[in-house]
Amino acid sequence: MRILVVEDDALLGDALQAGLQQAGYAVDWVQDGVQADHALCGETYAAVVLDLGLPRLSGLDVLQNLRSRQSSLPVLILTARDTVEDRIRGLDQGADDYLVKPFDLGELAARLRALIRRSTGHANPVLRVGEVELDPAGHSVTWQGRPVDLAGREFTVLQALMLNAGRVLSRAQLEDKLYAWGQEVESNTVEVHIHHLRRKLFPGLIETIRGVGYLIPRDKAGD
Ligand code: CA
């Protein structure tokens, strides 16, 4: 899952990027509102963490621009303790959640999981497809009740396909979720992860739609 972090405070931005990477996300970090606007126009994210007090273009303006493009991307705003009006305006302008600085990184990660889950139409935190269960919080997968050991990017690919069960994801869409800016995309990496997932789980779980992409059929979904 790829996240955009918009934060002009270098120390906080750096900590956010590192912390969310640790939690398994690909993270792009920008430090002003104009860069945020560009990133949101050009890239596909699972969610954005948006500071409101930003140079060049305020976080509220970034949010307003995003919603005026009819984007339903989950937005979590970061605000200072004394700016309750900003929080209200942010929520009224289409933010989905907020945190007041200073905040706990674990809480931020949990709120992002909830936002991403709801934005993809899943109320249950544990994803289920047939006998495969994936727990985003625990970063764990089981098949027929037995734990399956997946590498970080295998987990991300499986999570993306399970969140989108019944929809085909192209190789480019999956690559987008795996890599942040500046990370080199290794060729065939998605194919390799799919191959490993089929071997570690079972061959029929993920279907290849020739020339289009990959799919976990919805009728295998158990919930
Ligand atoms: Ca700021």
Image (tube, rainbow, N blue to C red):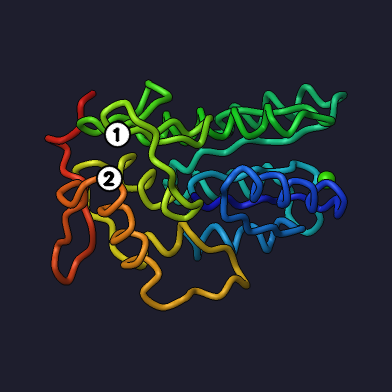
Q: Which residue is mark 1?
A: 143
Q: Which residue is mark 2?
A: 201
**Where does ligand 1 appear, by image quarter?**
top right
Tell me the amino acid under the disc marked 1: Trp
Q: CA distance from mark 2 to mark 1?
A: 7 Å
Tell me the amino acid under the disc marked 2: Leu
Judge left or right: residue 146 versus residue 113.
left
> How many discs appear?
2
Foreground: 107 or 102? 107
With respect to residue 107, does 156 lie above or below?
below
- Residue 20 figure quarter: top right
Question: Image point 79% across, 29% down: which residue?
Answer: 103
Question: Image point 29% across, 61% down: which residue?
Answer: 195
Q: Position of residue 178 (x, y in %)?
A: 48, 59
With respect to residue 21, does 179 lie above or below?
below
Q: Are marks 2 and 1 in contact (CB under 8 Å)?
A: yes
Secondary structure of the residue carrying numbered label 1: strand
